[in-house]
Image (cartoon, coloured by chain):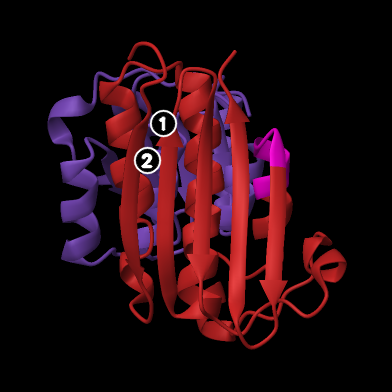
Chain colours: A red, B purple
Amino acid sequence: MSGDDKIHLSYQVEGGDLTRAGEASSSVKQTLRKLGLDPAVIRRVSVCMYEGEINMVIHANGGLAMVDVGLDDIVITLTDFGPGIPDIDKAMQAGYTTAADSVRDLGFGAGMGLPNMKKYSDDMKIKSIVGMGTTVTMVINIP
Amino acid sequence: MTLREVRDLLGAEVLSGDELLDTEVHAAFGSDLMSDVLAFVQDQGLLLTGLNSPQVIRTAEMMDMKCVVFIRGKAPASSILELAQDRGLVVMSTPLRMYQACGVLYSAGLSG
């Protein structure tokens, strides 16, 4: 990469099929590896992307995941047209969940997704309108 | 500790990645909650879990882990094993329960 070149990755995340959740994250991880990024940065992107992807699958019937890889940072934008989040502060609390029991069979749904995404990103913004959908933007700086 | 030693200590059956048993791991993590694996794992190369789901393999992949040990005799579906093979992950199954399996490995020098 040089100058203001950025690499744009885009994925349609399918809802409904819980067992396939994570395919987009896996693809992002492999691409970042090929680009030769610092493994610690790749790890942080992976966790943010994977938790976000799981959220889109279980709460919003899928959505669109975009990853912009620049020289200074990686920006993950997750957009869905799901039910929206009525109370974002509450949703950010560790342990708060509205996930169905079937989600717990996957090892998720314990109210740790958003806290994990915040923990592993340098900046996270959530915009949500009830009945319209949610957009989560996460920035991971490249040291 | 090599994965071969892990297998022998746990009396485990290797379900995928037989050719990778010389791989070394220095620490392990045990959990059935994948979000906790994502939250807490640092350099642990080995995951012990009683959760039987493809997300176990995805999670291990995200955290650069080398091996998944299914405890309590869990038998993962062939689709899970194919995913693990594709990602170069070793998969084992042990009849031991979580507390026992962790205790055996910890006593043998594998840290947490």
Left-right relation of B105 to B23: right
Q: Is residue B6 magenta?
A: no
Q: Is residue B105 above or below residue B62?
A: above
Left-right relation of A127 to B12: right
Quadrant containing the N terminus of chain A in the rendered view: top left
* Residue located at (57% from left, 38% from top): B29
**Co-location on one chain, circles 1 and 2:** yes
Q: Report which residue position mark 1 lands on.
A: B64
Task: Find residue A132 and report its horizontal and vertical position in percent.
Answer: 60, 83
Q: Secondary structure at mark 2?
A: helix
Image mark for residue A141: none
User: Which is more toward the observer, B95 or B21?
Assistant: B21
Look at the numbered discs 1 and 2 and tell me whether their residues touch, using CB distance below 8 Å.
Answer: yes
Q: Is residue B70 visible?
A: no
User: Which is more toward the observer, A80 or B38?
Assistant: A80
Q: Quadrant of residue B61?
A: top left
The residue at the far bottom in this view is A131
| Three-letter code for the amino acid on which mark 2 is drawn | Glu
Quadrant containing the C terminus of chain A in the rendered view: top right
Q: Rounded to the nearest whole Å, what is the CA distance between mark 1 and mark 2?
A: 5 Å
Task: Find residue A133 and report its horizontal and vertical position in percent.
Answer: 59, 77
Left-right relation of A31 to A4: left
Residue range (magenta): A117-123
Q: Report which residue position mark 2 lands on.
A: B61
Chain containing the residue with disc 2: B
Q: Is residue A61 above or below residue A1?
A: below
| Three-letter code for the amino acid on which mark 1 is drawn | Asp
